[in-house]
Image (cartoon, rainbow, N blue to C red):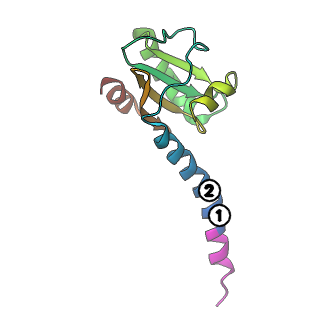
Amino acid sequence: MDNTGLFVVVTLAVIFVIPYLYMRISALRSVGKPVPALDQISAIESNTSQAVFLYFMSKNCSMCKSMSPVIEKLESDNPNIVTIDINQSPELAKNFHVYGTPTLMKIKDGFIKKVKLGKLSKKKIDQFIDD
């Protein structure tokens, strides 16, 4: 029996699964850590005790394109939601340990409280913001 097919399947799994898991684990590891300096984001007051939501996105990300209209509508109703294009602010994304888009992050009392990576439905975005 030839194991070439098995080798190809395992190789492809490693190539695609390991980076995905790295992004997920990095996002989860950032929860509970202190927030980097927010002075680069003019829309946020750094001493606020209200929750602030950061939406990291990229204009060339297909999942971001479908999620951005929902976030933009919520952003017009809620001033505590800020959209950050990682192509325009790569250093900010690096400081927040954002390695994949779309990423939605909840910040409160100077700490990262929750992080969601990947495409979210309107219902899940509303749940994320309401919690």
* Residue 19 picture location, percent across and down: 61, 51
Please identify the dominant SS of the magenta region.
Answer: helix
How many C-alpha atoms fall within 10 Å of the one at disc 2: few (<14), some, or many (≥20)?
Answer: few
Magenta stretch containing residue 7, yes or no?
yes
Marks 1 & 2, CB-CB < 8 Å contact = yes
Task: Give the residue number, with chain letter if any, for mark 2.
Answer: 16
Identify which amino acid the numbered label 1 is placed on: Leu
* Residue 125 picture location, percent across and down: 39, 29
Magenta stretch containing residue 87, yes or no?
no
Identify which amino acid the numbered label 2 is placed on: Phe
9 shown above or below 92: below
- Between 80 and 33, the one lying in front of the other is 33
Number of numbered callouts drawn: 2
Q: Residue at x 67, y 22 (%)?
A: 89
Q: Residue at x 37, y 14 (%)?
A: 49
- Between 27 and 59, the one lying in front of the other is 27
Task: Give the residue number, with chain letter if any, for mark 1.
Answer: 12
Magenta residues, start to end: 1-10
